[in-house]
Image (cartoon, helix red, strand yellow):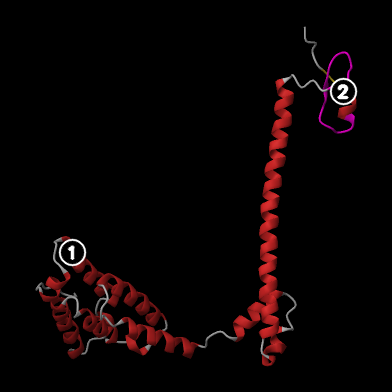
Amino acid sequence: MIPSPSTDPDSYSSGQTPRYLLKKGTPREYDTFEFHVTLDAANYSKYERALKFYDRKQTFYIAQEKALAEVSTFLNQSVHPDYYWVYWKKVTFRGRLITLKNEFKLSNSVRIYEVDVRYKQALRTNRIQMDIWLSNYWRAYIKAEELQILAVAGYHGYLDFLKAINAFLPDFFVTQMVTVKEAMFEGKDPSELPPVQKLVERFRSHMRLRKAQGVTAEQMSRGAFSATLN
C-alpha cells in the first residue's frame, strides 16, 4: 500500500516549491504523484519558452546594434566637413540621422520639378498596357494635384488625359473632348465640370465593360460608342 504524501514544512518557510515526501520522512521526492510531475513539467515548459524568447530578442538586438554601428561608422567617415557643425552637435545616432535628413530634405521647388517630370512621363502611352498605364498615370496625377503644379491646373488635366487615352479609345476621346471644349469656349470655370477623377473612373468603367463583352484592344481602338462627361 502506497502511503499518503506529507509536505516538508521547511519548504514553505524557505519560499521553495513544496516537496512531497513519504510519511516515513525520507528526503526522496514522491514523483509517483501525477500532480507533482505535472507541476514540474509546466514550470519547466514556461522556463523554456521564456528562454527561447530571450534568445530571439538577444539575437535581434545584437544584429540591430551591429547594423547601426556599421551605418554610424560610415556616416562618421562620410559626412562632409561643411555639415560637421550640425552633425556632431547631436549626441545620439538618431539625432544625427534626423539632422542629416532635415539638411538634405528636398526643397519645394525641387519636388515640384520632379513631380512635373514624372507626370509628363506618365502621359506617354507607347508600348504599354492600358491597365498599367492608367495606374501609373493616376499616381502621377494625384501627386501633381497635391503640389498644384501648373501642368494640371485649369483645363490642362482634362486635356492631357483625353489626349493620352486617344490611343486606347478614340471615340471616348472625341465625345469627352467636345464637352470640355464647349465649357472652355463658354468661359466656364473648370470647377464646374466633374473632377478629373470622375473622368478617369468613367474611362476605366467603359474599358472594363468592353473587355467583359469580349472586345479586344484593337477593336476598342477602332470601335464606336458614345459617352458624356456630364
Q: Which residue does the numbered mark 1 point to in the structure image?
A: 211
- The question of residue 8 being in magenta is answered with no
Residue 55: x percent and y percent?
Answer: 70, 51
Q: Are marks 1 and 2 in contact (CB under 8 Å)?
A: no
The picture places residue 16, in percent across and down from the top left corner, at 84, 32
Residue denoted by label 2: 8
Identify whether 211 is placed above or below 23.
below
Q: Is residue 220 left or right of residue 50?
A: left
- The answer to whether any part of residue 148 appears in the image is no
Q: Residues within 10 Å of mark 2 (few under 14, many from 20)?
A: some
Looking at the rendering, the stretch of residues picked out in magenta corresponds to 13-28
Q: Quadrant of residue 157?
A: bottom left
Q: Residue drawn at (25%, 78%), measured in percent from left and top?
A: 127
Residue 33 visible in the picture: yes
The residue under label 2 is which amino acid type? Asp
**Which residue appears at 43% of the width and 86% of the height?**
114
Q: Residues within 10 Å of mark 1 (few under 14, many from 20)?
A: few
In the image, 48 versus 200, the foreground residue is 48
Q: Is residue 18 left or right of residue 162?
A: right
Mark 1–mark 2 distance (CA, rounded to whole Å): 83 Å
